[in-house]
Image: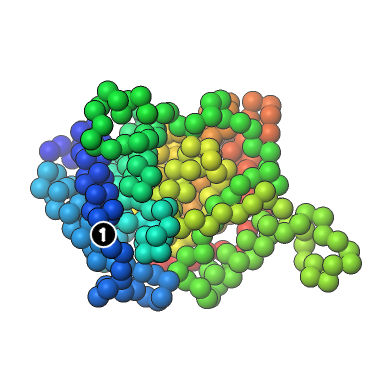
């Protein structure tokens, strides 16, 4: 198997087959932390199903692609950063807390990276039979339903290119944005404070009342349309890629949470930068991310100046506006 020119289409198709198999396992499971329990605290959960799915995925990939590396959430060893080598990056159940509670915002996330860049991404929600997929340079797609029982010809009729609205509508600024954020499992310390203060800046009124004691001494906020905390980084990125969400700001998650969604987002015309201000070129395993959806005429936003097609803001301008309300700076160990 070539380490220089991996067969991306073959890898894409094989990952889809694995995702369907994982989905069957997830749907058949009775969610319980059982003997597995939590990793570091009561908000960082793992189930026996997480572990069983990852074992199936890693075994399947190592059998077919023995020369490629594997990074998975349940077998990751601290302080082992992603390398330029061809690497599969897996989150067996992204949204474990949702899975345990029966909230159907759950996915398996399967990415393939080389030279530290995501090249293939598969994200599958078995509860809604929704599949997101991308190969770098070939666009990204949503297939629904995506049951393996459906013939390929019929599957194609359910396959839609992302973003779902084309051309993508303008972005009018944070005050008109629907933004995904996540609380994460770290609920104290400087990083948590950065999150909560920034959440306030995004949500608070941009015209606080002078006689409102709760606004005393507080700067105006952005008064975003709303914030959403749905519990799956991979599906959040796919929602930004689809255009259902405008932005997604997150820190503390890992490469396996974002690798697949990253290429799906970029192939849909969106952009990924660092959650910390000034970080235009984030690492896949940098644990700090800001995703912005596509804007018509923005040409994937890279190096864009001014407004997108003369209407609204460019992706770059949205990033700079968002960074302007971030209060603090994230510092996470790999």
Q: Quadrant of residue 2?
A: top left
Q: Residue at x 39, y 32 (%)?
A: 141
Q: Secondary structure at mark 1?
A: loop
Q: Is residue 121 visible?
A: no
| Residue depicted at x 54% and y 35% | 294
In the image, 252 versus 215, the foreground residue is 215
Q: Is residue 48 above or below residue 179?
A: below
In the picture, residue 55 is in which quadrant? bottom left
The x, y position of residue 19, in whole percent, is 26, 45
How far from the left and from the top, in percent, is residue 17? 21, 40
Residue 196 appears at what percent x and percent y? 60, 66
Number of on-image labels: 1
**Relative to residue 197, is residue 16 depicted above or below?**
above
- What residue sits right under mark 1 in the picture? 29
Quadrant in the rendering for residue 202:
bottom right
Residue furthest right as drawn: 211
Q: Is 234 rendered above or below residue 162?
A: below
Tell which of 156 and 94 is nearer to you.
156
Residue 248 shows in this picture: yes
Up-down relation of residue 129 to residue 140 (above or below): below
Quadrant position of the C terminus in the picture: bottom left
Which residue shows up at 57% across the image and 43% down it?
246
Q: Position of residue 180 (x, y in %)?
A: 54, 52
């Amino acid at each position: 198997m070539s380490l220089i020119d991996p067969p991306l289409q073959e890898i894409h198709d094989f990952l889809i087959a694995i995702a369907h198999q994982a989905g069957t396992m997830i749907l058949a499971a009775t969610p319980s932390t059982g003997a597995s329990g939590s990793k570091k605290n009561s908000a960082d959960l793992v189930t026996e199903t997480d572990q069983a799915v990852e074992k199936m995925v890693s075994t399947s990939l190592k059998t077919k692609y023995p020369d490629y590396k594997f990074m998975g959430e349940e077998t990751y060893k601290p302080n082992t950063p992603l390398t330029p080598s061809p690497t599969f990056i897996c989150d067996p159940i992204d949204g474990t807390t949702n899975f345990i509670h029966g909230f159907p915002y759950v996915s398996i996330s399967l990415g393939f990276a080389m030279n530290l860049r995501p090249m293939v991404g598969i994200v599958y929600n078995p509860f809604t039979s929704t599949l997101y997929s991308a190969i770098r340079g070939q666009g990204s797609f949503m297939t629904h339903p995506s049951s393996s029982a459906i013939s390929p010809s019929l599957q194609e009729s359910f396959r839609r290119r992302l973003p779902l609205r084309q051309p993508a509508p303008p972005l009018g600024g944070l005050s008109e944005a629907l933004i995904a954020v996540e609380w994460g499992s770290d609920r104290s310390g400087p990083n948590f404070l950065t999150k909560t203060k920034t959440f306030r800046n995004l949500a608070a009124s941009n015209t606080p009342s002078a006689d409102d004691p709760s606004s005393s001494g507080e700067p105006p906020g952005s008064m975003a349309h709303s914030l959403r905390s749905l519990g799956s980084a991979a599906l959040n990125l796919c929602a930004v890629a689809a255009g259902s969400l405008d932005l997604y700001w997150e820190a503390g998650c890992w490469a396996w949470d974002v690798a697949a969604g990253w290429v799906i987002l970029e192939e849909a015309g969106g952009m990924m930068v660092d959650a910390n201000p000034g970080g235009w070129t984030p690492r896949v395993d940098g644990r700090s991310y800001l995703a912005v959806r596509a804007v018509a005429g923005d040409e994937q936003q890279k190096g864009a100046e001014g407004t997108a097609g003369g209407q609204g803001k460019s992706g770059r301008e949205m990033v700079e506006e968002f960074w302007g309300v971030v209060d603090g700076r994230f510092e996470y160990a790999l």
